[in-house]
Amino acid sequence: MVEYVVMNPEQEDRISRPGQVIAQRLFDRTHVLRVVYKQEFNYVKIITLYVGRKKQYAS
């Protein structure tokens, strides 16, 4: 699931954390999975991930 979110996000935030990307995708009806990662050379380094309430992170 984490790899899928990074490769196919519904939303991406590249501004909030310089040098890092926050990828987000619907997890269930009321939650999203957010994955914070950094692209380093030819690989993706996962910094952290967490489940958040959909309404809190809606754009």
Image (cartoon, rainbow, N blue to C red):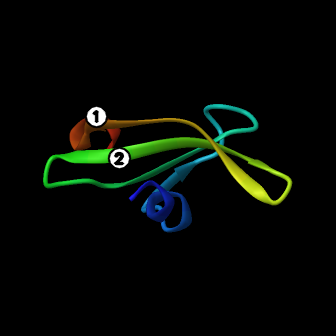
Residue 59 location, x and y as percent? 37, 47
Determine which of the numbered discs, if any, sits on residue 22 in the image: none
Instruction: Give the amino acid at mark 1.
Output: Gln
Residue visible at 44% across and 54% down?
2
> What count of labels does the image hold?
2
Can you tell which of label 1 and label 2 is closer to the viewer? Answer: 2
**Which residue was labeled with disc 2?**
33
Q: In this figure, which residue is indicated by the disc labeled 1?
A: 56
Rendered position, 47 above or below 14: above
- Horizontal and vertical percent position of residue 58: 32, 45
Which residue is depicted at the point 28% across and 34% down? 56
27 vs 38, left or right, is: left
State the CA–CA distance, disc 1 to disc 2. 12 Å
Q: In the displayed structure, would residue 5 be above or below residue 20? A: below
What secondary structure is found at the residue carrying circle 1?
helix
Please provide percent x and percent y for residue 14.
65, 45
Q: Nearer the viewer, residue 18 or 46?
A: 46
Three-letter residue code for mark 2: Leu
Query: Residue drawn at (34%, 39%), measured in percent from left and top?
Result: 57
Say which quarter of the image contains residue 26: bottom left
Q: Position of residue 34 (x, y in %)?
A: 42, 43
Instruction: State the SS at label 2.
Output: strand
Q: Tell me which label, 1 or 2, sits earlier in the chain.
A: 2
